[in-house]
Amino acid sequence: MQKVSAVPQQAGAVQAILLMLAALLPIMGTLTMIPVMPLLFQHFSSQAYSRWLVPMIITLPSVSMALLAPFAGMAGDRWSRRRLLIIATGAYAAFGLLPVMLESLHAILWARLMMGIADAFILTAANSLIGDYFVGEARSRWLAIQSGAGAVMSTLVILCAGLLGDFGWSGPIYLYALAIPVFFGLCFFTREPATYRTQAENVQEASGPFPRQRMAGICAITLVSAILYFIEPLQISQVFNQLGIRSSSHIGIATAVAGIGVPLGALLFRRLSKLWPARQLLVFYLVFGFGLLFIAVARNPFSGVLAAFVAQIGNGLLIPLMLAWVIRAIPAGHRATGMGIWHTFFFLGMFISPLLVTGMNTVTGNLQSTLLLFSILTMAIAAGIFLVFNLANIKKVQAH
């Protein structure tokens, strides 16, 4: 058992920024190769089954994260989360950069698979350590900042990867070198969580048995929310194209403008951070539902960008909301396990979302009609949350 310092050190901005940067590495791992997909197909066209294998360069890390996040979480609860994060960050840098020295497509896929395994450990350990290092308002603030920073970094990664793609298919791979300073920062500027916490705080978050029923409820809500969450980022480029934005660069600019809503949603979370998760979810479903509705009825590029902006405000609220909920609902000793399970259902929602939209398109005949149906569903969920929440309050009043 780790000893708690009588006079604990103060975890501050340096530790929070390092953990946020670490948590953003898996985002970079997924996005970096997207701009050079045509170059990848061209470069590996002579290798067997390249048509099927090249897309796996992007999807393999996400699949690894979804499948292995619970096991990474259990490892984080059993051993030191900080050490696992440091090892995983080092492995991310090594396997991320390895493809620049490889020519075999199969060898590159193995490297990407190993990087995805590192991603799973990074996600669970980094987000768990934010919960370990900070409590209350400080925790809510850093989770909100992380959500906003993720949107900004996603835009910058796509932009930089596109520029580096001018040097060849392997150009964007050098972005993974950003993990190296994060690795050394974690080594020198972080400590085990107990050194940052007072005895009272550790007792307050002492571990009990793993709350299976509570986690099952969180996972169900996460899956539904994630399916809806990924509708806008995965489908909005097609909407913009249908509204008359043909140029890929113009679509990128429109997407970036709409993405300004994400940090605003994170700011909204800070305002709502003291409310119960049910009320926070109600706000998310209302805002996102209206955003989807506006996208569905948009008839020109300006209204489409404005509608996507509204939806992105909801998306910016959801991630810190759910992370804070998991951190608060799961005892500290099981926090990494809970975080790993949560990531699995979140990425499962990412996988299911486009399949549902594609299936609905065959029924409705076009994307915007499908989005209209999903907006109605989202608003119905918001109405259900509102009714359940108010009925619970009425019962409490009657009981007194």
Image (cartoon, rainbow, N blue to C red):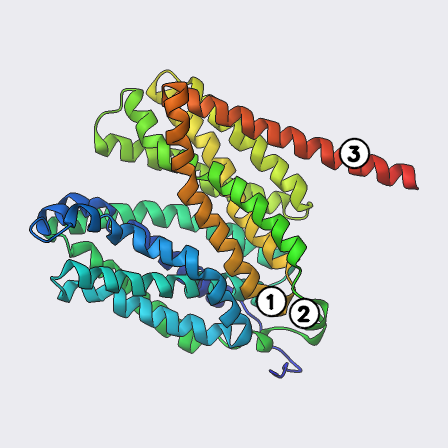
What residue is shown with label 3? 391
Q: Is label 3 in a helix, a strand or a loop? A: helix
Can the viewer see residue 19 in this picture?
yes
Instruction: Please tell me which residue is depicted at 52% across the width and 44% down the height of the picture.
Output: 223
Observer-nearest residue: 353 or 197?
353
In the displayed structure, would residue 87 be above or below residue 71? below
Quarter that holds the C terminus: top right
Would you call the spot at circle 3 few (<14 residues within 10 Å), some (14-19), or many (20 or more)?
A: few
Q: Is residue 1 left or right of residue 151?
A: right
User: Could you say which disc has been placed on residue 265 in the image?
Assistant: none
CB atoms of marks 1 and 3 within 8 Å: no
Mark-to-mark CA distance, 1 and 3: 32 Å
Instruction: Please tell me which residue is depicted at 17% across the width and 45% down the height of the picture.
Output: 51
User: Could you say which disc has been placed on residue 207 in the image?
Assistant: 2
- Where residue 48 sits in the image (x, y, percent)? 12, 52
- Where residue 71 sits in the image (x, y, percent)? 48, 66
